[in-house]
Amino acid sequence: MKIFNTLSRRKEEFVSLTPGEVKMYVCGPTVYNLIHIGNARPMIVFDTVRRYFEYKGYTVRYVSNFTDVDDKIIKKANEEGVDADTISKRYIAECKKDMEGMNVKPATVHPLATEEIDGMEDMIETLIEKNHAYVAQDGTVYFRTSSFKEYGKLSHKNLEDLQSGFREIKVTGEEGKEDPNDFVLWKPKKEGEPYWESPWCEGRPGWHIECSVMAKKYLGDQIDIHAGGEDLIFPHHENEIAQSESANEKPFATYWMHNAFLNIDNRKMSKSLGNFFTVREIGEKYDLQVLRFFMLSAHYRSPLNFSAELMEASKNALERIITCAGRLRDLEQKAAGEAETCEEQGHMEEADGFRRKYEAAMEDDFNTADAIAAIFELVKLANSTADENSTKAYVSYLKGMLEELCGVLGLITQKKEEALDSQVEEMIAARQKARKEKNFALADQIRAQLLEMGIVLEDTREGVKWKRV
Ligand code: AMP
Ligand code: ZN
C-alpha cells in the first residue's frame, strides 16, 4: 500500500510500527460553530482511509480531538453571555450529529483539550527541563525553535529564511520571545477567560501542544499516521513535530497525510471568508451520503471545487449504485437456491477483476476516484447480467461485493427508509423471540424502543403489524 508522505514529498510503501495495527491521529475541529463542508473533507477522507485499513485486516486506533478552548470559543461565549464550556459542548454534540449523517465512524477516542491539561503541563515541564522551552517574564512559556535542529522538515521551510522573513515584524504581547519563530506552549490568562493553575502562571495552553499530548497519551510516543487539512502543515504540524520529538526523543509520525482544500469559486472555503456552507445546510437539501460521494469523487490531494452541478451529478451517480443494489437484493430474495452456472462463473471472475482494480486504486495513495470507477464497472456488469433467470449464488455474490466495496468508502447502498424498515423488522423478530422465551421485560423494552422511533406495534391474529405514527 502506497501513501504520499508530506515529510518526504513522495509516495512510500506503508509499513506499520506494530504488525497488523495502525495508530492514526487526525486533528479535529475547533468547536464554536456548526462545521462547514470544508471541515467535513478531512473527516470523510480519513474515515475512508481508516475503513480501508480495516478492510485489509488491520486494527485501527483512530484518535481525533475536539479543540474546546480557543479564542473563537471564548469570543462566542462572551457574545452569548454563557461560559466557554456551554459553547463547546453544544457544538461537539452538533458535530457528532453531522458525522453520523456523513457516516463517519466515531473515533476510538475523541479527547477534549480541556480534559488533558495535566498532560500538557507535564510535556511543557519536560520541554523546559530539556532546554527546548523557556519561561518569559510574564509567565508565557515558549518553545525554542532553534533548539530543534530539524525544525521546518515537514513544511520544507528553512529556519534562516523564516527568521529573515520575520525580522521586521514585532508582535505586541510577544516581547518575551527570544526568536520570532518561537511559539507559545502556555499563555497567561486574560480577563474573562477560562484558566488553569500551572507552575508558570494562571493561564491556558497554546493550540499545538494539545495534539502532541493527546497523541502520546492515546497512541504512544510513535504513531503511524498523522493527518489533517493542508493548512495545518505549517505551523501546526511543524510545531507538533518539534514538541513531540524534542520531548520524547523519538520520531513522531511515520506518515503525514494532508488533504487539499475544498474550494468555492476557486477559493478555500472558510469561516473567516464567509464563503461556506454548513454540513447542516447541505443536509437539508441532500442526503449527506451525496456529500460523502462528492468528496470521494476526487483524489484527496486534489483541490475540489464545490458546485450545485457537481452535487447533482453525485446524487445521480449514487442513485445508480443504490438502484442496482436494491435490484440485486430483490433478485436475491426471489432467486432459486442452486449453484452458479458456468456463464455466471465467468462473470464472477470479471467481478473479481473489478475488486482488484478497486484495491489497486485504494492502494495507490487512496485514489477513491478510481475506486468509484471500478464500482461502476461492477454496477454495469450487474445491470447487464443479473436478472430473474440468475441463480441466487450469482446474485448474492454481486450484491455482497457491491455492498462491501461501497461500505469501505462509507457509502450505504440502501435508501434510508429501506434500511429503517429492515431494522424495524429485526427488532420485531427479537421481540417475538423474547415473548416466546417468556422474557416479557425485554419484549416490553423493545416495544418502547420502537415507540421512541415512532413505530407502533399491533398484535393481530395474522401476526405483528406495525405502522409509523
Ligand atoms: P479548523 O476547525 O479550522 O481547525 O479545521 C478543522 C479541519 O478542517 C482541519 O483539518 C482543517 O485543515 C480542515 N479544513 C478547514 N477548511 C478546509 C477546507 N476548505 N478544505 C479542506 N479542509 C479544510
Ligand atoms: Zn492538531
Image (spheres, grey):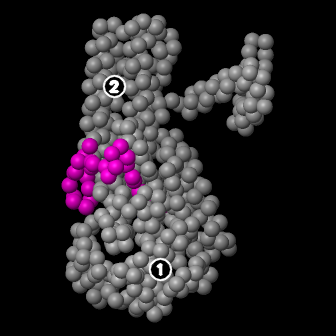
One can see residue 469 in this view: no
Any mark on residue 89, and which? none
Query: Ligand 1 within 8 A of label 2's CB?
Result: no
Residue 132: quadrant of the picture: bottom left
According to the picture, the residue beneath numbered tag 1 turns out to be 186
Tell me: 463 left or right of 385.
Answer: right
Residue 402: quadrant of the picture: top left
Q: Specify few, some or many for label 1: CA neighbours under 10 Å numbering under 14, 14-19, or 20 or more.
A: many
Q: Are marks 1 and 2 in contact (CB under 8 Å)?
A: no
According to the picture, the residue beneath numbered tag 2 turns out to be 378
Counting every numbered tag in the picture gives: 2
Q: Position of residue 157 (x, y in %)?
A: 24, 72
Q: Is residue 205 above or below residue 137?
A: above
Q: Position of residue 42 (x, y in %)?
A: 41, 53
Tell me: 449 left or right of 249.
Answer: right
Q: Is residue 241 above or below residue 463?
A: below
Query: Ligand 2 within 8 A of label 1's CB?
Result: no
Element type where label 1 sits in the image: strand
**Is 12 contained in the magenta span?**
yes
Q: Nearer the viewer, residue 286 or 422?
A: 422
User: What residue type is disc 1 on?
Assistant: Trp
Q: Residue at x 41, y 9 (%)?
A: 391
**Start and end of the magenta stretch?**
1-29
Q: Residue at x 57, y 66 (%)?
A: 115
Q: Nearer the viewer, residue 347 or 36?
A: 347
Q: Position of residue 302 (x, y in %)?
A: 29, 52
Q: Residue at x 29, y 80 (%)?
A: 147
